Amino acid sequence: RDPISVTCFGLGFAALAWALVLPWWSFPSGELQKSVELPQGLFSIPVGVLALWGIVLGTIAPYLLTVSALRHLPATTVGIVATFEPVAASVIAWVWLGEVLVAVQIAGGIVVLVGIVLAETSRGGQTGALASG
């Protein structure tokens, strides 16, 4: 299947599953109308716009890019990059936005990085065989 249909099916089934756990009509939609101040007092923005930003750029775009990458990269490489993404986002949020990371989050990031290194070093000799085969 093409990446867009896979993305639509994946997110659609996830939405249906969550609809059973937390029905849509129980969502506090009035909260989306409120405005919030952005850090450093740049400007005020509706919560609905921020939610849409998170949905599109935080869920749909990464999922679509991950599925699209499978056409060009081996699945193991795509999986490793997808595993690294939350760690990189946490570091960027810590450095750029001043987010605070607690010890368990830092330890989790280190565990993920160690896992990535182990995964990459353990398959080092296999990549050349696949490329030439």
Image (tube, helix red, strand yellow):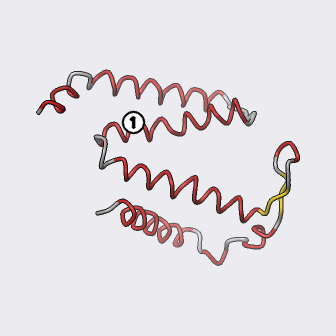
- Above/below status of 32 relative to 3: below
In the picture, the quarter occupied by the N terminus is bottom left
Label 1, on which residue?
A: 80
Residue 11 is left or right of residue 25, and the answer is: left
Residue at image coords 52%, 67%: 18
Residue 71 is left or right of residue 104, and the answer is: left
- Above/below status of 80 relative to 9: above
- Above/below status of 126 relative to 3: above
Under tag 1, what secondary structure? helix
Residue lying farthest to the left in this orientation: 133
Residue type (three-letter) at the residue carrying disc 1: Ile
- Above/below status of 28 relative to 2: below
In the rendered picture of this protein, how many numbered marks are placed on residues? 1
In the picture, the quarter occupied by the C terminus is top left
Residue at image coords 85%, 48%: 42
Residue lying farthest to the right in this orientation: 41
The crowd level at tag 1 (other Cα within 10 Å; few <14, some 14-19, many 20+) is: some
Residue 103 is left or right of residue 113, and the answer is: right
Q: Nearer the viewer, residue 98 or 61?
A: 61
x%, y% of residue 33?
A: 79, 70
x%, y% of residue 21?
A: 54, 68
x%, y% of residue 109?
A: 54, 30
x%, y% of residue 95?
A: 69, 29
Q: Nearer the viewer, residue 59 or 41?
A: 41
Residue 87 is left or right of residue 120, and the answer is: right
Residue lying farthest to the bottom in this orientation: 25
Residue at image coords 61%, 30%: 104
